[in-house]
Amino acid sequence: MASHLSPADLSPVELGRIMDTALAEDLASGDVTTRAVVPPDAVAHGDFSAREPLVLAGLGVARAVFARVDPTVAFECLAQDGQRVPAGAVVARVRGGAHGVLTAERVALNLLQRMCGTATRTRDFVDQVPAGSRLRITDTRKTTPGLRALERYAVRMGGGINHRNDLGAGVLIKDNHIIVCGGVRAAIERARKSAPHTLRVECEVQSLAQLDEALDAGADVIMLDNFDDDGSREALRRIDARTPRPLVEASGGITMARLPVLAALGVDVISVGSLTHGARAMDLGLDLKLTGSWATSTAS
């Protein structure tokens, strides 16, 4: 897992859009405090430190923010995205003109803290999957508007995988589609007729009766929505009897404690919305020291 983002990890165009939006929000009126109190020739350096145990994600994003504000600011990664670090660990260092460092600090930390939160929560789930199990932990589209690309990257750094990125990335028939279409079979048959042949047809079911209907209609993927352990056990018994067997996803009411049970039953994928919408920002900070001509003059 690289400590910087490559085009395969996140589109530079998308990253630029996110940074520009965040910086425009924070700098709509400029950085009046820095301009007022910090001499233009002041130089600052400091450490990014984890103030609690966490999984890293977003060091490359933080570095890109500083470069966006002042390309002369040096940002050194001392750890890698995807790495679990203890409280007190120094994960990066920054050095450059104090104006650029201070102006970029909050946006860089906001994005880094949120991404680390998602990566850490994802790793907590992934660590509960029994060794050797085929079960995979995925995210959902329950992401922060405008930040989906960063949050999905953070899920990958936490050891999870990504579900469909947007509404055009896959056919997923949910409860409201079923209501509008008049039933599970009708919805799946319509999807078969009109959806691109390259996309799987996934159908959410909320009962065993809907499951049977989806199986008979030939769904490629079955999502068991809010099934308890007993219901999941019976659902897997019926699914395993089918050839070809559809992929099985479970979602809704999923706790870490349930993961070993669902893995043993043969669930293939568990989608967890709280990887993104339930993650809290982790506590990281940037502690600066002043260097250069102003530091020397004030010290004397």
Image: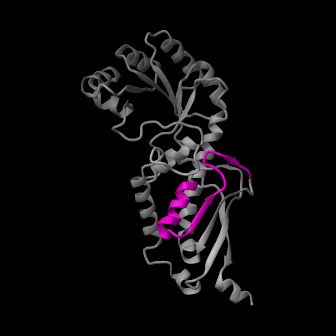
Q: Is residue 288 magenta?
A: no
Tell me if 186 is positioned left or right of 296 in this view.
left
Which residue is pictured at 48% across the width and 69% down the height? 69
Q: Nearer the viewer, residue 222 or 230?
A: 222
Q: Is residue 209 above or below residue 103?
A: above
User: Which residue is drawn at the image coordinates 51% and 60% (left, top)?
Assistant: 64
- Counting from the top left corner in percent of width and height, residue 276 is at 53, 46
Q: Nearer the viewer, residue 247 or 153?
A: 153
Q: Which image quadrant for residue 36?
A: bottom right
Q: How many marks?
A: 0
Image x and y of residue 77, in percent: 62, 56
Q: Is residue 158 above or below residue 39?
A: above
The image shows residue 112, relative to residue 254, as above or below, that is: below
Is residue 83 in the magenta section?
Answer: yes
Report the side of 101 relative to 181 (left or right).
right
Image quadrant for the C terminus? bottom right
Q: Nearer the viewer, residue 83 or 113?
A: 83
Q: Which residues are magenta?
A: 59-86
